[in-house]
Image: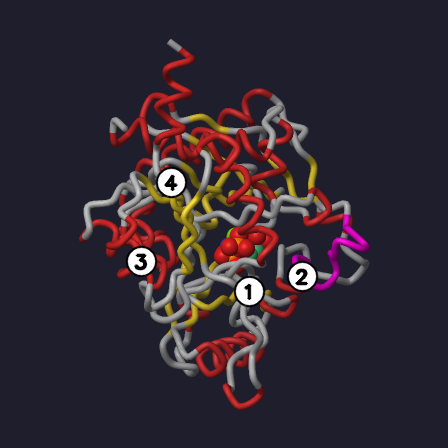
């Protein structure tokens, strides 16, 4: 009975775990975008309020060194995980690992999937194994490596282990050997990690929000990135500048169309490649998947975001909430649909 369901869910002890953005001190020597993946207090509060609307009081756990003790003490029935982690190549896996150790259910993907998607090269290797289209690529660990022997120009150079457009700048597209060498050296030095160099996909770009699991996995309306909204001379990529500098809540860029204007065949091809990628990487409950067409119009996977950003304010141009709004879901519906997918998976 629906009434019983509400009563049961009210009794559930729900926790929310997150990493807050911090100020960077001058002495720390960190890149200006170091905390770009972490959340603002408004986003964390919006998710807390959405969970609270359906489940009453929410236990708040900042994903810091005290998190383990707090989870152990509180023992929530389920945790909504939006913690991106701060330190290390497996930072997104740390909280899920703690929760598995404590046998506490949580939303979203497991430690292995989170680590593999954060490492874009590993994710692309798996996609390639399953024959899911993704741009040809090389991992460069040395600035003098002759990548041009293996890949064709134009190429795009990015840090191998980042998100939120960290290290993807307007000049990340390279068209000749000197700029390729320079850009690879810059990534190696500034981000202290290998550079992922990919052949550039020149077609239309989309992002697909998925919710659910198995046969109930659903694609929300597809978002298209409109590069015509960028100022003249700016490269058509969703770069750090495009995301955080040219587009602000005070002067939002009209950079997204949702639902994207697509014929039925292309829409189903984009949804199918996204769901295939979700399955291949063993993603759970939710994910935002970036897709771009090659010169022949074939959709390719750029990357998977199993912990997608969810900024509530429509002016912040956050894709997952935008797709949810286009599907007629409120922010509360969206957050709780992820929680419900996890509950169903665990049978809670
Ligand atoms: N091979 C490629 N061909 C064309 N454009 C690309 C390619 N790889 C990346 N891009 C462009 O760069 C943007 C950022 O790349 P990517 O999605 O890998 O970075 P990210 O920082 O992880 O993104 P997010 O903010 O979604 O986490 C893409 O949205 C796309 O515009
Ligand atoms: Mg992306």
Judge whether 287 appears above or below 67 on screen. Answer: above
Q: Are marks 4 and 1 in contact (CB under 8 Å)?
A: no
Q: Is residue 64 above or below residue 227?
A: below
From the image, state whether disc 4 or disc 1 is nearer to you. 4
SS at circle 3: helix
Mark 4 to mark 2: distance in Å? Answer: 32 Å
Q: Nearer the viewer, residue 328 or 163?
A: 328
Q: Would you say residue 245 sits in the magenta stretch?
A: yes
Prevailing secondary structure of the magenta residues: loop
Count how many numbered circles sit on residues in the image: 4
Find the magenta span and give its range.
242-253
**How packed is label 3: few (under 14 Cα within 10 Å), some, or many (20 or more)?**
some
Residue placed most toward the observer, 293 or 94: 94
Asked whether the residues under the numbered discs 2 and 1 touch, taking CB atoms below 8 Å apart as contact, a structural biologist would say yes
Residue 205 position within the rendered picture, expressed as x and y whole percent measured from the top left: 60, 44
The residue carrying pointer 1 sits among few (fewer than 14), some (14 to 19) or many (20 or more) residues within 10 Å by Cα, namely some
| Structural distance between the alpha carbons of marks 4 and 3 | 13 Å
Q: CA distance from mark 2 to mark 3?
A: 34 Å
Residue where numbered disc 3 is placed: 70
Q: Identify the residue at image location x=57%, y=65%.
A: 168
Image quadrant assignment for residue 150: bottom left
Mark 2 and 3 residues: CB-CB less than 8 Å, in contact?
A: no
Which coloring applies here? secondary structure
C-alpha distance separating marks 3 and 1: 25 Å
Residue that carries the numbered disc 2 in the rendered image = 244
Determine which residue is flagged by label 1. Answer: 36
- Find disc 4 in the rendering and name its residue: 14
Front tag of 3 and 1:
3
């Amino acid at each position: 009975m629906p009434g019983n369901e509400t009563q049961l869910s009210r009794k559930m002890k729900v926790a929310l775990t997150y990493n807050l953005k911090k100020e960077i001190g001058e002495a720390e020597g960190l890149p200006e975008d170091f905390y770009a993946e972490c959340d603002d207090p408004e986003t964390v509060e919006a998710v807390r309020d959405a969970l609270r609307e359906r489940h009453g009081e929410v236990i708040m756990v900042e994903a810091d060194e005290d998190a383990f003790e707090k989870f152990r003490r509180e023992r929530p029935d389920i945790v909504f995980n939006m913690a991106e982690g701060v330190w290390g190549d497996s930072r997104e896996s740390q909280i899920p690992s703690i929760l598995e150790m404590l046998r506490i259910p949580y939303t979203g993907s497991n430690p292995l999937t989170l680590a593999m998607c954060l490492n874009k090269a590993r994710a692309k290797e798996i996609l390639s194994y399953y024959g899911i289209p993704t741009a040809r690529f090389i991992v460069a660990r040395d600035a003098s490596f002759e990548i041009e022997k293996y890949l064709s120009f134009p190429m795009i150079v990015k840090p191998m282990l980042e998100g939120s457009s960290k290290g993807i700048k307007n000049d990340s597209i390279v068209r000749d050997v000197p700029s390729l060498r320079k850009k690879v050296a810059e990534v190696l030095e500034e981000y202290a990690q290998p550079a992922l160099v990919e052949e550039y996909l020149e077609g239309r770009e989309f992002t697909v929000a998925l919710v659910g699991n198995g046969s109930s996995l659903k694609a929300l309306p597809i978002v298209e990135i409109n590069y015509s909204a960028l100022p003249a001379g700016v490269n058509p990529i969703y770069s750090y500048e495009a995301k955080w500098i040219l587009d602000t809540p005070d002067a939002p860029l009209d950079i997204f169309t949702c639902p994207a204007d697509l014929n039925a065949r292309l829409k189903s091809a984009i949804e199918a490649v996204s769901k295939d990628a979700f399955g291949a990487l063993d993603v759970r409950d939710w994910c935002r998947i970036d897709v771009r067409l090659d010169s022949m119009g074939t959709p390719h996977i750029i990357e998977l975001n199993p912990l997608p950003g969810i900024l509530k304010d429509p002016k912040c141009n956050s894709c997952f909430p935008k797709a949810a709004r286009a599907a007629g879901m409120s922010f509360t519906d969206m957050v709780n649909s992820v929680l419900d997918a996890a509950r169903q998976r665990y049978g809670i």
